[in-house]
Image (cartoon, grey):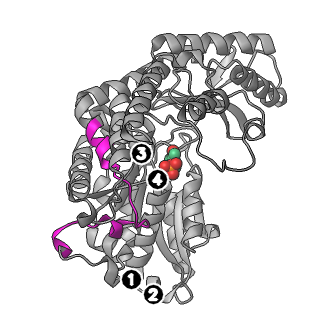
Amino acid sequence: MDSKDFRKNAHKFVDWMADYMENIESYPVKSKVVPGEILAQLPEHAPDNPEDMDDIFQDFQDIIMPGMTHWQHPGFMAYFPANASPPSILAEMLTSTLAAQCMSWQTSPAATELEERVMDWLKDAIGLPKEFHGVIHDTASTAMMSAFLIAREKLNDFKTNHRGLSEAGLHCCYASAEVHSSTDKGIRMIGLGSDNLRKIPLDENFSMIPEALEKAIQADLDAGHKPTCVIATLGSTSISAIDPLQAIGRICKKFGVWLHVDAAWAGSALILPEFRWMITGIEHVDSFVFNPHKWLLTQFDCSAFYARDKAALIQTFEILPEYLKTREGDLVNNYRDWGPQLGRRFRALKLWFVLRSYGISGLQEHIRRHIDMTRQLAERISQEPDFELLAPNPLALFCFRYHPEGLAEDLLDALNERIFEAINDTGEIYLTQTRINGKYAIRFVSGAPATRQRHMDKAWQIIKKIAIMTK
Ligand SMILES: *Cc1c(COP(=O)(O)O)cnc(C)c1O
């Protein structure tokens, strides 16, 4: 494709993109295809000869689009959001065009220095301490695994990286019973064994009980094991529970255990001063992750990882064969030494565009609007005699079920499952489900950039109508 054709197609695509954003509500939020339907429309072999871009684009519209779930749809209230925004999309276009591989300072000094600067901006914006050093990862999963590795290496005098785990003893980690599966996975991947992740009991707000944590650590010490890392969650995935950082932090200090905070979704709410209470005790925290790609208008992938001990971070990951040496040495950050990946995308650019084009106040407005709208809807549902909330809702997430008067408990799970499926089949809104104390719960999250009050009102009308019909 020559530059004339590129220009022509790019203009056409940008028009398509703007139309898509304007008309997103006309699509069903959740794709309606059945398994195999897309695959059956794709030829078994790649074409031998070049194909025309008009044909490729037509197939994109005819074959691919029906199989897409529309995460930016205002009725997307499932999982957690994966925000995009016009400034972020524009930056990604530039990133793709520059196509730089930003593994070290020398391979694109601007990418490295911009990353350092925007990660500091972001740190200030959410109230993290000055001593934290930030790096952008693809996902929180990668960031979490990094945290566990640094904790392990620091505890073992950085020897396990070289000698392997055979002489390391039994490493134990601790998290709330509501912890995200990426913790189990990260612990497996670095060889600590997820059976050695202690799931600490919860109080009535589904927050970790600090006394139970302390007992578990003491028991492992008594057994000759190595308490290595505590994972505190701010905003658990299922129900947005918040672990008490201050009390957990004191215990970690007492026993010299690394404290990692998983705030993948809820971390964005720290941009609001009224939610900073969630990080009371941050002075005890060793590492922290949150995803601007969830709720902060910066599109996937952009996960912000912060660690206090930069030297330990680098000592854990640094590996310097001759072909990677550059003469700047310690004068600069080489982010290849800050995590598992060598090759790195230029992710800081979209964060810079987003932070500048919305400003902190614009981002605050976005987060605050979702929290306010969600709380109001939860309040409204809690006042309905035939509906009940199943957990506290501190942020923009609540869990509920339909519970008509007189209906026996053992019928409620199946009823709510049918309601849930029927809601999602409308294509108007998209919710996910969870279980709370064994009860089937319908989970509602607001966070898509396009969602406004009228979408919340409509969501409630749909939920109510379908619940009554299904009964
Ligand atoms: C989404 C989420 C994760 C995983 O995030 P990825 O970036 O997809 O790896 C981890 N922890 C919590 C609490 C989450 O909500």
In the rendered image, which quarter is residue 250 located in? bottom left
Nearer-N-terminus badge (4/1): 4
Task: Give the mark nearest the N terminus, 2 or 3.
Answer: 2
Between residue 80 and residue 308, name the one nearer to us: 80
Camera-nearest label, 1 or 2: 2
Name the image quarter holding the N terminus: top left
Q: In the image, 414: left or right of 330? A: right
Residue 50 quadrant: top right
Looking at the picture, how far across and down is residue 446, in whole percent? 50, 26
How many marks the image carries: the answer is: 4
Which residue bears the numbered disc 3? 291
Tell me the amino acid under the disc marked 2.
His
Label 3 vs 4, first from the N-terminus: 4
Q: In the structure shown, which secondary structural element does the residue marked by tag 2 occupy?
A: helix
Real-space CA distance between mark 3 and mark 4, rounded to the nearest whole angstrom: 7 Å
Residue drawn at x 69%, y 24% as measured from the top left: 424
Q: Which residue is mark 2?
A: 162
**C-alpha separation, residue under disc 4 versus residue under disc 1:** 23 Å
Q: Is 431 covered by the magenta stretch?
A: no
Q: Which residues are magenta?
A: 329-353
**For the residues bearing labels 3 and 4, Cβ distance under 8 angstroms:** yes
Residue at the disc numbered 1: 158
Mark 2–mark 3 distance (CA, rounded to whole Å) = 31 Å
Q: Are marks 2 and 3 in contact (CB under 8 Å)?
A: no
Q: CA distance from mark 1 to mark 3?
A: 28 Å
Q: Circle 4 sits on which residue?
A: 140
Q: Residue at x 72, y 25 (%)?
A: 420
Three-letter code for the amino acid on which mark 4 is drawn: Ala
Specify the amino acid type for callout 3.
Asn
